Amino acid sequence: MKLTWLDLRERGEATSAILEEAIHQRVDSVVASDPALLADLPPTVTGVLFPDGPELPGDFGAARVVIVDPALHGDTTVLSKEHPEVEFGRFVDVSDAQTLEEACEAARTERWSVLRFRDPTKIPLEIVIAAAAEADGGIITEVADVEEAEIVFGVLEHGSDGVLLAPRAVGDATALRAASAQAPGKLELVELEVRSTEHIGMGERACVDTCSHFREDEGILVGSHSKGMILCVSETHPLPYMPTRPFRVNAGAIHSYTLAEGRRTRYLSELRTNSTVLAVDVEGRSRHVPVGRVKIESRPLISIDAAASDGRSVNLILQDDWHVRVLGPGGAVLNSTELRPGDRVLGYLPAEDRHVGYPIHEFCLEK
């Protein structure tokens, strides 16, 4: 999860309500120019002091981090020796080649680097992230709104370690926290044993065309039931008579579930341009990818029944064609029409039932 710093240096009528919301949402840090605003923060929220003027206060109060401009406040190494009770970070206002180099140096050497970029392009941030690739410090990038924060979180795939946002209204802290959790994390995949396959006639299947280039060991999870899915591989692997389409997963019958943002299930039939699906590799690593379009066409279908070692069953209905494939242990690419009882495929077994796609612990029988 990315770091969320809420900038409350400019206090207004809604400051108290915004601060209450920030604490409730467990933002990582509250930033203030007055130590008094940080006095009553709970231990779950880090108080960050960011002075507005050229003078540091005599008492940092409850602040655990202090952000300084070395040109005004002095070198952070010296300040750290004088005030070992707090961590110091460096602010850089990036507006030209010289300040960009200062930002790169700060990202390489400082515990915290708070960066403001004057250029609307994200190229300067890309340069800083690349320059600090092996560094241990945290890069916090100032953003104008939550939409920009989502972009900053994904720059160079790694993104800034966190963002600094001055909220405009109640609700911004909640939206920022949700945006920071966009990286979905790792899923625990399991091996499933194929029990049977059956040709079931004509139906509609969906090809999910995304705006991302899938890797060879990556696809999306699809299943007839919300409690069991199989990893369908993308069309990154060569096929006779047709070129590869590394953005596509021939995903299955339109009633099927797949995973989307927040690990919420979506029916393949309801995906459309600008939807989000979860791309998953054979190690369970996952990422959100946007959908460019969904192609729904009538095709012959094949039903695949598999089971986990504990007896839980999984069903997947795919287009009945050799070129439609699923992934097995070690990234083995398995043609769906050649699956036989005893073959092993990779799958996912969510623990929760679903209500309108959201996980919930309740009684639900799917068959």
Image (spheres, rainbow, N blue to C red):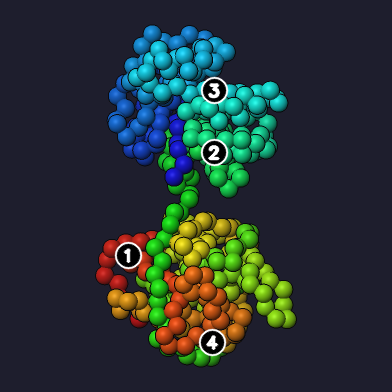
Residue at mark 4: 338
| Residue at left offset 57%, top offset 13% | 71
Mark number, residue 91? 3
Tag 3's secondary structure?
strand
**Sequence order check, earlier mark of 2 and 1:** 2
The type of residue carrying mark 4 is Glu
**Quadrant (top left, top right, bottom left, bottom right) of the C terminus:** bottom left
Q: Is residue 350 left or right of residue 328?
A: left
Closest to the camera, between mark 3 and mark 1, is 3
The type of residue carrying mark 3 is Phe
Determine the CA span between mark 2 and mark 4.
46 Å
> Answer yes or no: do the residues labelled 2 and 4 have beta carbons within 8 Å?
no
Q: Position of residue 56 (x, y in %)?
A: 45, 11
**Sequence order check, earlier mark of 4 and 3:** 3
Q: Splitting the image into 4 quarters, where does residue 193 fall?
A: bottom left
Tag 4's secondary structure?
helix
Determine the CA span between mark 4 and mark 3.
60 Å
Closest to the camera, between mark 2 and mark 1, is 2
Tag 2's secondary structure?
loop
Q: Is residue 200 left or right of residue 47?
A: right
Tally of numbered discs: 4
Mark number, residue 134? 2
Determine the CA span between mark 3 and mark 1.
45 Å
| Residue at left offset 61%, top offset 35% | 131
Residue at mark 1: 352
